[in-house]
Amino acid sequence: MKDEDTRRRSEYQRMLNRHLLRKHKPVNTNLSRIVYYGCFLATLATLAFTWTGCASEERGQQVFLVNCAGCHQGAPSYLDKRPPHLDGLFQTGKLPSGAPATNQQVRRTIVEGFRSMPAFHQRLNDQDLDDLIAYLHAWK
């Protein structure tokens, strides 16, 4: 009885495989190569843009959205004290802590943290910090 069930299952599987092979035509390999190389080139272009040595406001915005916006734009309700909004940070001349709003001071605050703000020294590299500061300078 078991042998007959096994035989039926394998016969059914062969029939199903034949049907599926007939129904689906092979993929055009030239088209798939074009798509593959197009994706590869797009990835290279993205990496080249990322690895340029100059500060980028666009990259800074991404760094801000991933690392800072969660608190500095719509802080979670469980925080006792709301973190300050950073609009016009460099235009005011002073940080919310009262320290002068300079690149060096902002970098130190981000890297070392301040009061309830965590330190980001292990999360952000120098390029990320440069991009983030460039983005904060653009905020008005």
Image: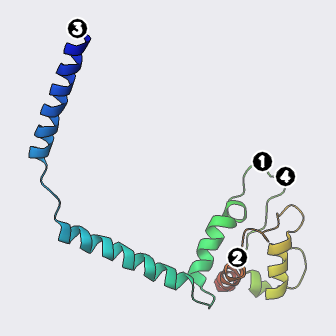
**Gap in angstroms between the C-alphas marked 4 and 1:** 6 Å
In this rendering, position of residue 49 left or right of residue 111: left
- In front of the other: 55 or 11: 11
- In front of the other: 67 or 12: 12
Where does label 1 land, which residue? 78
**Picture coordinates of residue 74, whole percent (x, y):** 68, 59
**Gap in angstroms between the C-alphas marked 2 and 3:** 77 Å
Residue at left offset 32%, top offset 75%: 37
Where does label 3 land, which residue? 1
Which quadrant of the view contains residue 89? bottom right
Q: Residues within 10 Å of mark 4 (few under 14, many from 20)?
A: few
Q: Residues within 10 Å of mark 2 (few under 14, many from 20)?
A: some
Comes first in the chain, label 2 or label 4: 4
For the C terminus, the image quarter is bottom right
Where does label 2 land, which residue? 87
What residue type is disc 3 on? Met
Comes first in the chain, label 3 or label 4: 3
